[in-house]
């Protein structure tokens, strides 16, 4: 079978990088059209190899030589920077980086004809504070690589340093490698979802090979020596089985203590969570006593908003909802939080269901709240607060709310994923 030739594939060209694109790649003009260049900086003059087509037809270039270095370049602080897919922008000077992140939100808003003047200064969370991470692992011979995937590759960067995660999470990597070496067959892959809770690390290992008796003993010993709160195992997509539990993993939101499900969603840093919660609380008027939290997860916002208000939390994932409902039964909450399982894509809350609330908070996954937002737009809810991890889907949803009669009052971008192209935000809408 003949392979389709990739446009520009393998050819060398010289270009100047003029700006950064939405995913953090430098953008340069060439006779063949725009070229996206990972790990470059505006002001770079580069010799590239055209490496093929990106989605949407633009080309991707790999740097062969930096002919002239941008003044915005700095020495990347991590030795893995470049190959490691965990960070894309450590080579960029701090102000240029934060200006670019700030600008990302405005760009998406303007694309939808929205007022970029509503975007406030970027709130930044320091590196080294990520308390939840997903590490990839693979055994090759007598070695286990454990770390993040390389960009656009299944290869794993075996981390000897990481400036993103907390010290507690990083220190787990070496002993975890040793355990996986005694467990995984040669060539096998695994995934470790680590979350640092208030009572210790909650670790979920996903492998295809079920742990035998000996491995279970080794894992229990590992959990004890590393003082983990809980260690669970599952095959990808299956329900996790706890293998060792020294303490219940615990997180506090407002006056609720929540036991998260193994591997479940958690705001990536405690600092980021505090900033998000403060922004959401600040947007809800003291007179708002009936609140809805849509895409509530384990209740990060629901519990933090439940005094004096009553919160109805809607969530599609049964494990997250079970954790929320168990926590909601704590006497200190006096029944102020209730959960309901609801798939908000298939069965969004209708305007007449929303109209009973004084405020609605929604925090959808990356794809946004495409099915839910038109119903909010038709409601009479006075205050709507959006939390988003994707400025593109946010801007689309915001347009629908504004066309439905809401005013966009403020947008605060929050950088919980330093040196990456990910960005979160909190936005406040009023009727
Ligand atoms: C970005 S997380 C936010 C969770 C929570 N607000 C927090 O901050 O911890 C998005 C949540 O939406 C839930 N979700 C995804 N798709 C959903 C759907 N169609 N219906 C309801 N919930 C959904 C996920 O299970 C997840 O808990």
Image (spheres, helix red, strand yellow):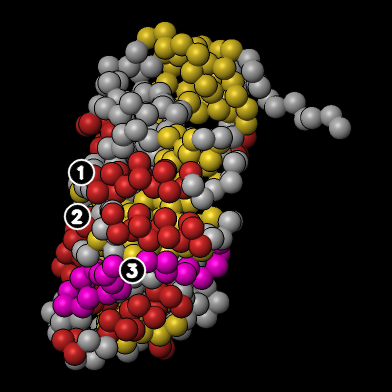
Q: Which percent across, then down, holds residue 322?
A: 39, 80
Given residues 279 and 112, the one toward you in this image is 279
**Spatial separation of the CA atoms under disc 1 and disc 2:** 8 Å
Vertical placement of residue 139 versus 215, above or below: above
Q: Earlier in the sequence, mark 2 or mark 3?
A: 3
Mark 1–mark 2 contact, CB under 8 Å? yes
Could you tell me which residue is drawn at 57 percent across and 17 percent down? 49
Label 3 sits on residue? 245
Q: Respond yes or no on whether mark 3 lies under 8 Å from ligand 1.
A: no
Vertical placement of residue 287 versus 169, above or below: below
Disc 2 versus disc 3: nearer the observer: 3
Identify the secondary structure beneath mark 2: helix
Alpha-carbon neighbours of circle 2 within 10 Å: few (<14), some, or many (≥20)? some
Could you tell me which residue is drawn at 36 percent across and 51 percent down? 133
Regarding residue 312, the answer to whether it shows in the image is: no
**Spatial separation of the CA atoms under disc 1 and disc 3:** 31 Å
Instruction: Identify the magenta region.
Output: 235-259
Q: Tell whether 333 sits left or right of 228.
A: left
Q: Tell whether 308 sits left or right of 178.
A: left
Label 2 sits on residue? 271
**Spatial separation of the CA atoms under disc 2 and disc 3:** 27 Å
| Residue 236 lies in the magenta stretch | yes
Q: Which percent across, then down, holds residue 91?
A: 32, 25
Q: Quadrant of residue 154?
A: top right
Identify the secondary structure beneath mark 3: strand
Q: Quadrant of residue 174?
A: top left
Alpha-carbon neighbours of circle 3 within 10 Å: few (<14), some, or many (≥20)? some
Residue furthest to the top in view is 67
Label 1 sits on residue? 126
């Amino acid at each position: 079978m003949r392979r389709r030739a990739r446009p520009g594939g393998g050819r060398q060209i010289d270009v100047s990088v003029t700006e950064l694109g939405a995913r953090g790649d430098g953008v340069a003009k060439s006779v063949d059209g725009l070229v996206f260049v990972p790990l470059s900086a505006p002001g770079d003059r580069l010799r590239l190899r055209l490496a093929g087509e990106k989605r949407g037809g633009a080309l991707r270039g790999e740097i062969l030589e930096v002919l002239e270095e941008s003044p915005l370049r700095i020495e990347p602080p991590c030795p893995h920077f470049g190959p490691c897919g965990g960070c894309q922008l450590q080579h960029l000077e701090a102000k240029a980086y934060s200006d670019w992140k700030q600008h990302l939100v405005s760009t998406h808003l303007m694309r939808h004809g929205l007022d970029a003047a509503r975007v406030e200064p970027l709130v930044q969370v320091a590196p080294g504070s990520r308390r939840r991470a997903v590490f990839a692992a693979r055994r090759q011979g007598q070695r286990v690589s454990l770390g993040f995937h390389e960009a656009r590759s299944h290869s794993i960067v075996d981390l000897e340093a990481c400036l993103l995660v907390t010290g507690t999470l990083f220190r787990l990597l070496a002993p975890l490698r040793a355990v996986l070496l005694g467990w995984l067959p040669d060539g096998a892959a695994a995934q470790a979802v680590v979350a640092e809770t208030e009572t210790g690390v909650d670790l979920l290992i996903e492998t295809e090979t079920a742990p035998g008796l000996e491995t279970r003993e080794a894992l229990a010993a590992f959990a004890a020596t590393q003082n983990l709160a809980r260690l669970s195992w599952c095959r990808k997509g299956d329900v996790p089985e706890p293998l060792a539990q020294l303490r219940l993993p615990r997180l506090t939101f407002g006056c609720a203590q929540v036991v998260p499900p193994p591997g479940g969603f958690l705001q990536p840093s405690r600092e980021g969570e505090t900033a998000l919660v403060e922004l959401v609380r600040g947007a809800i008027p003291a007179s708002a006593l009936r609140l809805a939290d849509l895409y509530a997860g384990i209740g990060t916002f629901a519990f933090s908003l439940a005094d004096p208000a009553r919160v109805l939390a809607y969530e599609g994932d049964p494990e997250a909802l079970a954790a929320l409902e168990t926590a909601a039964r704590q006497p200190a909450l006096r029944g102020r939080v209730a959960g309901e399982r609801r798939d908000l894509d298939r069965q969004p809350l209708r305007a007449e269901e929303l109209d009973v609330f004084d405020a609605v908070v929604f925090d959808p996954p990356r794809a946004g709240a495409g099915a839910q937002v038109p119903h909010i737009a038709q409601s009479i809810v006075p205050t709507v607060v959006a939390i988003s991890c994707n400025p593109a889907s946010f801007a689309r949803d915001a347009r629908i709310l504004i066309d439905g009669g809401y005013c966009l009052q403020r947008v605060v971008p929050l950088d919980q994923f330093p040196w990456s192209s990910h960005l979160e935000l909190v936005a406040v809408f009023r009727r």
